[in-house]
């Protein structure tokens, strides 16, 4: 099961040069360490296609080009080591244009993702949905099946499909329908799911349900938030669904904090979260706010940290192993983490 996310900003040539470029490459490497297996970029024009192509030559992370409206952008992307092209049948244009993209992709052995969104259905299907003569989920499936038909006629089988809506119900129904009609792999997600809390809830309901039914081959948790949080949310969903059990990785448990707290769990968790998710260790880390919910409740943790008065306690499987000041907490925690 491959976790995906999408770069949040427009990529300019200056972004991949010099110090800025080092930062971009470093962030992509960190996303990979956190569990991301493919990174998608919006490619609105030819310059963006060429910029993405140059970036693809500098990173090991597979990069995907997201193409709308202009098939020539897809053709240009295929001149570079792009891992995948995503096109939307609702706006990519005529069959002839699709054929040109498929022909070049076949030569380069690059897969195509047919990405169908409820907000950009082909015109005739959109009208029928608005008139109430066609269910939105059925319209999503019909759009995908049309494109798959063209792929089949041309003998192109390096394809996968995504059917996304902002409605959880539409997303579930559409993916269930298509999963029963095709053997092509499905990329699953809820589009425009919202900010962090709302988005995680909606994605969890939809994706956990589909995964439990054996539907889905790649996954993205779409959030109005950071790429890192999208990857973390996807990892957690895969973990609770049983899809991520074989992955090595850190499980973080932390208390919500209350008036008893003498340790800033929120701040500490925020500082350490992304790094902890890059670790190739199957361990449980506890970040607790006070001695009530410290070594006692988190006694199963491989490593934990909490506060007691003016001191910070670090514990291992319920036993306190170090007592330090708050100023030394991060350094001491890192030392103990490296010993695990």
Image (cartoon, rainbow, N blue to C red):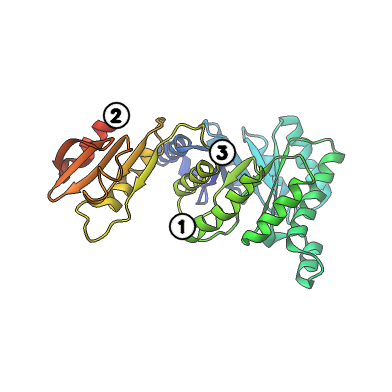
Query: Considering only vertical position in the picture, is 190 above or below 26?
Result: below
Under tag 2, what secondary structure? helix
Q: Is residue 103 left or right of residue 42?
A: right
Under tag 3, what secondary structure? loop
The residue identified by callout 1 is: 196
Label 1 crowding class (10 Å Cα cut-off): few <14, some 14-19, many 20+? some
Residue under the image location 32 percent in, 55 percent down: 256
The residue identified by callout 2 is: 338
Q: On the image, which quarter does residue 78 sit in?
A: top right
C-beta proximity under 8 Å, tags 1 and 2 = no
Q: Which is more toward the observer, 93 or 282?
A: 282
Q: Which is more toward the observer, 154 or 216?
A: 216
C-beta proximity under 8 Å, tags 2 and 3 = no
Distance between the alpha carbons at the discs numbered 1 and 2:
31 Å
Q: Upstream in the sequence, badge 1 or badge 2?
A: 1
Q: Can you tell which mark lies on residue 256?
A: none
Q: Is residue 144 left or right of residue 81?
A: right
Q: Which is more toward the observer, 188 or 28?
A: 188
Q: Position of residue 288 (x, y in %)?
A: 27, 48
Query: Extreme bottom residue here?
Result: 131
Q: How many marks?
A: 3
The residue identified by callout 3 is: 243
C-beta proximity under 8 Å, tags 3 and 1 = no
Q: On the image, which quarter does residue 135 sit in?
A: bottom right
Residue under the image location 77 percent in, 46 percent down: 180
Distance between the alpha carbons at the discs numbered 3 and 1:
22 Å
Query: Considering only vertical position in the picture, is 200 above or below 274?
Result: below
Query: Extreme front residue here?
Result: 296
Q: Which is more toward the observer, 40 or 223?
A: 223
């Amino acid at each position: 099961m491959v976790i995906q996310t999408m770069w949040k900003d427009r990529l300019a040539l200056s972004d991949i040069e010099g110090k800025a470029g080092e930062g971009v490459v470093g962030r992509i490497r960190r996303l990979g360490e956190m569990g991301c297996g493919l990174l998608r970029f919006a490619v609105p024009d030819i310059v963006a296609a060429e910029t993405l192509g140059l970036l693809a030559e500098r990173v090991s992370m597979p990069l995907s080009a997201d193409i709308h409206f202009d098939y020539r952008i897809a053709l240009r992307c295929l001149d570079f080591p792009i891992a995948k092209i995503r096109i939307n049948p609702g706006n990519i244009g005529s069959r002839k244009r699709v054929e040109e993209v498929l022909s070049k992709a076949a030569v380069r052995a690059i897969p195509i993702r047919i990405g169908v969104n409820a907000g950009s259905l082909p015109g005739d299907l959109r009208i029928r949905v608005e008139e109430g003569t066609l269910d939105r989920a059925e319209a999503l499936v019909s759009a995908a099946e049309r494109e798959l038909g063209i792929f089949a006629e041309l003998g192109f089988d390096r394809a996968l499909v995504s059917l996304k809506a902002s409605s959880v119900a539409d997303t579930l129904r559409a993916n269930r329908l298509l999963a029963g009609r095709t053997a092509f792999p499905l990329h699953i997600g809820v589009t425009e799911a919202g900010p962090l809390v709302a988005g995680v809830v909606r994605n969890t309901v939809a994706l956990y349900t589909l995964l439990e039914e054996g539907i889905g081959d790649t996954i993205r948790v779409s959030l109005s938030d950071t790429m890192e949080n999208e990857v973390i949310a996807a990892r957690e969903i895969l973990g609770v669904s049983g899809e991520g059990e074989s992955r090595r990785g850190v499980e973080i448990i932390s208390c919500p904090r209350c008036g008893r707290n003498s340790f800033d769990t929120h701040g500490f968790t925020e500082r350490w979260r992304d790094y902890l998710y890059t670790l190739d260790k199957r361990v449980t880390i506890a970040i607790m706010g006070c001695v009530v919910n410290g070594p006692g409740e988190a006694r199963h943790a491989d490593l934990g940290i909490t506060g007691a008065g003016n001191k910070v306690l670090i514990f291992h499987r319920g036993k306190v192993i170090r007592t330090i000041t708050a100023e030394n907490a991060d350094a001491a925690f890192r030392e103990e983490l490296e010993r695990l």
